[in-house]
Image (cartoon, rainbow, N blue to C red):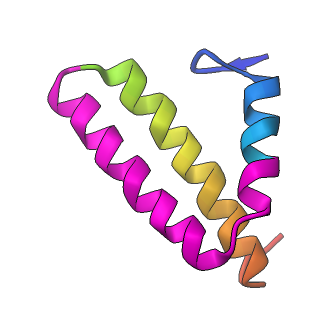
Amino acid sequence: HREHGVSRAKVAEEIIEYSRMSTEHGMKKVKQLEQKMYEHAKNLEFENAAKIRDEIVRLKDIILGKQGTKVG
């Protein structure tokens, strides 16, 4: 299964990396990724922007899960 061209192995690596981050570091990473996503969108690189958007969603899920606010 590939999610917008991202392999499962890459997603698994991201999840492991992000789960080791502090919440503060994770939020800084979200800001960096958002800047990259907007840059791609501005340059009409929508596939790249979508990949980063998906990565941001995964990172936020992990951060929120650490804070105990994730439901489900």
| Left or right, 4 with reference to 34 | right
| Left or right, 66 with reference to 32 | right
Residue 32 position (above or below residue 24): above
| Left or right, 66 with reference to 25 | right
Q: Position of residue 1 (x, y in %)?
A: 79, 16
Which residue shows up at 76% across the image and 72% down it?
Answer: 65
Quadrant placement of the C terminus: bottom right
Q: Is residue 45 magenta?
A: no
Which residue is more in the foreground, 33 or 56?
33
Q: Position of residue 39 (x, y in %)?
A: 23, 36
Secondary structure mostly seen in magenta is helix
Which residue shows up at 30% across the image and 49% down it?
Answer: 35
| Left or right, 57 with reference to 36 | right
Q: Is residue 17 magenta?
A: yes
Q: Position of residue 71 (x, y in %)?
A: 77, 75
Residue 67 position (above or below residue 7): below
The residue range painted magenta reads: 16-44
In the orientation shown, which residue stands out farthest toward the left?
42
Disc count in the image? Answer: 0
Which residue shows up at 20% across the image and 21% down it?
Answer: 44
Which residue is more in the foreground, 37 or 22?
22
